[in-house]
Image: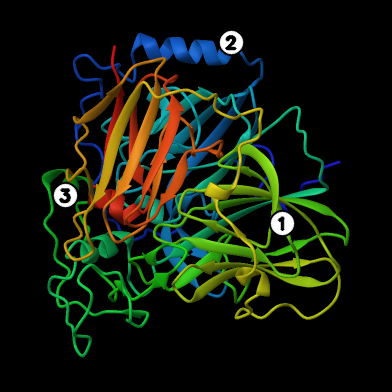
Amino acid sequence: MRTPTRRAVLGTGIAFAGGGLLAACSGSGTDHSGHGDKPPAGSEGYVSPHGKEVAAAETKRAASVSGSVRRVKLTATPARLDLGGRTVSSWAYGDDLPGKEVRVTAGDTLALTLANHLPQPTSIHWHGLALRNDMDGTPGLTQTPIKPGASYEYRFAAAHPGTYWFHPHSGAQQDRGLYAPLIVEDSKEPLTYDKEWVVVLDDWVDGVDGSTPDAVLAELGNGMGGMDMGDSGGMDMDMGGHGMSNMSMTTRTTTRTTTKATAEAAPSSKPSGPSRMLMGATSKLLGGDAGDVAYPYYLVNGRTPDDPQVFRARPGDRIRIRFINAGGDTAFRVALGGHTMTVTHTDGFPVEHAETDALLLGMGERYDVLVTVKDGAFPLTALAEGKKRSAMAVLRTGGGAAPKPSVRPKELDGRLLQARQLKADGSVRLKSGRPDRTITLRLTGSMAAYDWAINGKKYDPARRYPVRSGERVRLSFVNSTHMWHPMHLHGHTFALPDGGPRKDTAIVLPRQTLDVDFDADNPGLWMIHCHNVYHAESGMMTVLGYRR
């Protein structure tokens, strides 16, 4: 029997988040509310998020389920958050970090009302779910932004079991504390385990020494312009980082051109805090440059390694761990000291079981694993890949000294599985077939100019790549940059090549191409974007649009 507890899981059942405490610094990057107060709609010839095609798809989805309606009330609010020895002002869902878990059973209809107590408009995107388009939570595309003081009900059928999460799609808000797990349980769960843990990984900057994600975005937006190079001449202008130390550089200025839409969304945003630009973070696993931001903290379930969360179990217990990378700019390499892990799912879909010592998670990716735990105290370590820092929690099944925050379990350097090495379980494997349509998405830009884009064009909600219902579609991600990009497709799951796993987020390495296929079976307007918050907000986003 599974016996999840409040300590083992971030909150079973349905979460009701409360209000916040102290106001945080306001400000946002580019809000996606490009249509102002006008209700979003499909351009001529495209399916509207509120159109009859979307309603028909949801009716079909709901007809295949017979669950109950689960009602949730959630508040987005300024809050004081204890990271474990450091308290910061930020924004959160209630006063919890991560936000309290929402848990439903596949077939349930989720009816979640979000009250916006923030000083800015906001939204919720349901990352990984195939849901009705008008509930996807992309302001300016599928809904109008939720204004301060207003509320909005998200209501949709949660048809497929899996590990998901939710966060805003408004500016750089996700890199605050506005995120939480969404677990859709399988009423016919084929796995057997004694306990279940949800482990949310994050990189943290908000409220530390005056920093905000908006200030980070403003600084990065300058690229290398205005940088005080000091004695670091000879730098690779493509920012591959080879031969450089892992350091945060000082900039002379953090001014940034502000559009009218940005100014309206963030009337009081000002660059603040020390420089957070990261130079010289490299990783062979990521093909070179590991990231842009020098975060002061890395967290497991909202805690630093100095005061980690402790998971308790009995020796011999079989544990299901659901890993979620909610970071803004960091891939995490994860291992449980003294143990091997059996991978069972990625991005909510089952895979052929595979043993590993460690996993690599890009931003937005999720993995489920099974572990049979030993006797003692063990570190659950999440290495910030290429950044020479770690997050940590502790597994305790018996006596012994607690692992030190600086511990590096040998499993981090052992067998490491990545998505391309996995195979989809036969029950969810995409049927073989030639694509009816191929869409080439060239990932462009550089750290030097911080001009991230798709096919050389920054995000414009009116620009759509067309598909039609019933087509087999191939997305060809061609990474022409020196950075890695975790690419995320809303509203669908795609298949990696050669019987690979079903996913909604996949790492595309520098100077490489990744082809993924999906069936166009969920009409509407859907975002495709890099899940590095700062790359996306700088322009590496576009729209997939169903033709009528």
Q: Nearer the viewer, mark 3 or mark 1?
A: 1
Look at the numbered disc 3 and give the secondary structure of its residue.
helix
Name of the residue lying farthest toward the bottom: 231
Write down the residue under mark 1. Answer: 341
Q: Which label number is shown at residue 226?
A: none
Q: Residues within 10 Å of mark 1 (few under 14, many from 20)?
A: many
Q: Using the image as rendered, state which of residue 203 and residue 416 is in the foreground.
A: 416
Q: Is residue 492 above or below residue 61?
A: below
Q: Residues within 10 Å of mark 2 (few under 14, many from 20)?
A: few
Tell me which label, 2 or 3, sits earlier in the chain: 2
Q: Using the image as rendered, state which of residue 50 and residue 477 is in the foreground.
A: 477
* Residue 238 visible, this orientation: yes
Write down the residue under mark 2. Answer: 63
Identity of the amino acid at label 3? Ala
Indicate the position of residue 174 as horizontal and vertical percent values: 40, 51
The answer to which image quadrant residue 1 occupies is top right
> Seen in the image, is 271 located left or right of residue 245?
left
Look at the numbered disc 2 and give the secondary structure of its residue.
helix
Q: Is residue 125 above or below residue 533?
A: above
Write down the residue under mark 3. Answer: 263
